[in-house]
Image (cartoon, rainbow, N blue to C red):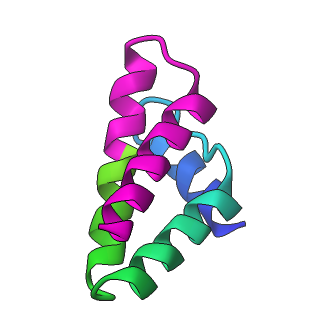
């Protein structure tokens, strides 16, 4: 997968290890945002969710739990 190659390339450049937790869940979230708001919101929403996950993981949270928190918040916002 391209994301695995990209992650490996980032590690080679000295960045911390990055691992995609659940690629399908991330893509589903991006799709939900694209269809539930303006399409242009999807990439930024996904980036912000990832940033949130990174911050929570650095605080010791489980990556899957952090992703679920971020995705659930995004879904609630889409529902209005």
Q: How many marks?
A: 0
Which residue appears farthest toward the top when viewing the image?
60
Which residue appears farthest toward the front when viewing the image?
80
Q: Nearer the viewer, residue 75 or 16?
A: 75
Q: Residue at x 36, y 75 (%)?
A: 42
Q: Does the magenta-highlighted stretch encompass residue 8? A: no
Main SS category, magenta section: helix
Residue 30 lies left or right of residue 25; in this view the side is: left
Q: Which residue range is magenta in the image?
A: 51-80
Q: Nearer the viewer, residue 74 or 41?
A: 74
Q: Residue at x 39, y 61 (%)?
A: 46
Residue 6 visible within the image: yes
Residue 14 visible within the image: no
Q: Position of residue 10 (x, y in %)?
A: 46, 46
Q: Nearer the viewer, residue 60 or 78?
A: 78
Q: Position of residue 34 (x, y in %)?
A: 41, 83
Q: Residue at x 38, y 13 (%)?
A: 59
Q: Position of residue 72 (x, y in %)?
A: 47, 49
Residue 30 lies left or right of residue 41; in this view the side is: right
Q: Is residue 17 above or below residue 13?
A: above
Q: What quarter of the picture does the N terminus occupy?
A: bottom right
Q: What quarter of the picture does the C terminus occupy?
A: bottom left
Say which quarter of the image contains residue 24.
bottom right
Q: Residue at x 39, y 24 (%)?
A: 56
Q: Is residue 40 above or below residue 80?
A: below
Q: Position of residue 18 (x, y in %)?
A: 52, 38
């Amino acid at each position: 997968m391209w994301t695995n190659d990209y992650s490996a390339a980032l590690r080679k450049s000295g960045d911390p290890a990055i691992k995609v937790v659940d690629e399908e869940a991330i893509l589903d979230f991006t799709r939900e945002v694209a269809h539930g708001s303006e399409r242009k919101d999807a990439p930024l929403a996904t980036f912000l969710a990832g940033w949130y996950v990174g911050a929570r993981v650095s605080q010791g949270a489980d990556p899957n739990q952090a992703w679920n928190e971020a995705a659930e918040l995004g879904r609630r916002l889409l529902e209005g």
